[in-house]
Image: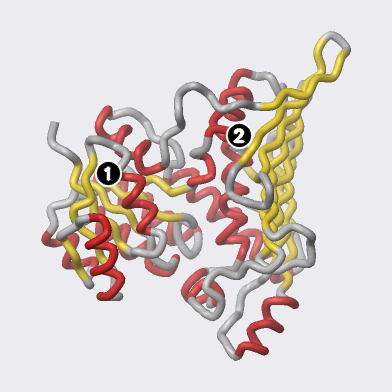
Amino acid sequence: MTKLRVGVIGLGMGKGHIRGYATHPQAEVVAIADLNEQVLATVGDEYGINGRYTSAEQMLAEANLDVVSIATPNKFHKAYTLAAFAAGCHVLCEKPMAMNAAEGREMLAAAEQAGKRLMINFSYRFSEPSFALKAQVDSGILGDIYFARTVWHRRRGIPRFGGWFGQKALSGGGPLIDLGVHRLDLALWLMGYPQPTWVMASAYNPIATRLAMEAGVAYDVEDMAVALIKFANGATVEVEASWATNIREAELMETRLLGTKAGLVQRNVNEGYQFEAELYVENAGYQFDMKVHPPLKPVPNSMNHFVESIVTDTPHIATGEEGLLVMQLLDAIYESAATGAPVQI
């Protein structure tokens, strides 16, 4: 079978996409695009990719691609997604899906019109603990899930301080749209993506704003956001995200779900990017704690999963529809934080 021809736009996060596609035998990254010629040359040499473009539009016009990964600043997600669909490509777009839900709707409509797939890179689903917990939830072991708390805090961890992450015109927001989006999606995915009804939120920026003023760099987004989300089925989710907050841990990630029969937690280990998971159940009148161990079958990364779904013509997870619902929630959180009032979904 002919390999799928893949192009990657944006070579910051895009390097991870290149490595991800390399794990599937039916995919080959044949073209890359980035405005920085030095980065383009370095990455092209490192991964043996000859198709190198400083213009993503030129790459889409010339490289005859089947799949495109978009790993640019958030501001450009919509435009490059629409261009990729117009070129006849399936699209794997970095999170967040777009700058706002209105852009997300345009992207979904373009995917439908083109008859192509749109997947959002909610990469924190693609770990052995996450897949193991999802299998347990789907088996019914938790019963009815009525509460979740999902957080990602950093003591001091503003990405590329002074760059596009801290500029709302390019990013759409701060740690909520950068980090919180991952933990929110993970909780919603485990819960089966229930329908939200309203949001109440707050946002703060005392630490990062001070640091930016001292460093003389641009910064106009929050450094912490918190939200309470209510769902039509009665469940509630609490979301917290920060780049700069006064905690002990350098990096704290945790997603906890409470159900009528059991509870679970997925959290990072030793303040790093490895994760563990546990289940807490009651059975025959006794309480049990169960630690999740890695399964015998490894979990694919998101690029591998996307390619496999295309090759086998099977559904993929982390769909554009789920990405749009997350964008609607992010919009509502920022609106509630700005107005100080609940926002109906």
In the rendered structure, are the residues bearing label 2 and label 1 in contact, judged by CB atoms less than 8 Å apart? Answer: no
* Residue drawn where x is 78% and y is 21% of the image: 281
Relative to 277, residue 41 above or below = below
Which amino acid type is shown beneath numbered disc 1?
A: Lys
Q: CA distance from mark 2 to mark 1?
A: 26 Å
Identify the secondary structure beneath mark 1.
loop
| 177 lies left or right of 38 | right
Q: How many marks?
A: 2
Relative to 232, residue 144 above or below = above
Badge 2: how crowded within 10 Å, few (<14), some, or many (20+)? many
User: Label for residue 116?
Assistant: 1
The quarter holding residue 257 reads top right
Is any atom of residue 95 visible in this view? yes
Q: Of residues 87 and 94, which is closer to you in this image?
A: 94
Which amino acid type is shown beneath numbered disc 2?
A: Leu
Quarter of the rendering occupied by the N terminus:
top left
| 160 lies left or right of 91 | right
Residue 34: image location, x then y, percent: 29, 69
User: Label for residue 190?
Assistant: 2
Residue 184: image location, x then y, percent: 62, 48
Q: Earlier in the sequence, mark 2 or mark 1?
A: 1
User: Label for residue 8?
Assistant: none
* Residue drawn where x is 20% and y is 56% of the image: 48
Relative to 10, residue 197 above or below = above
The quarter holding residue 193 reads top right
Viewer-side label of 2, 1: 2
Residue 272: image location, x then y, percent: 62, 51
* Residue drawn where x is 73% and y is 45% of the image: 149
Badge 1: how crowded within 10 Å, few (<14), some, or many (20+)? some
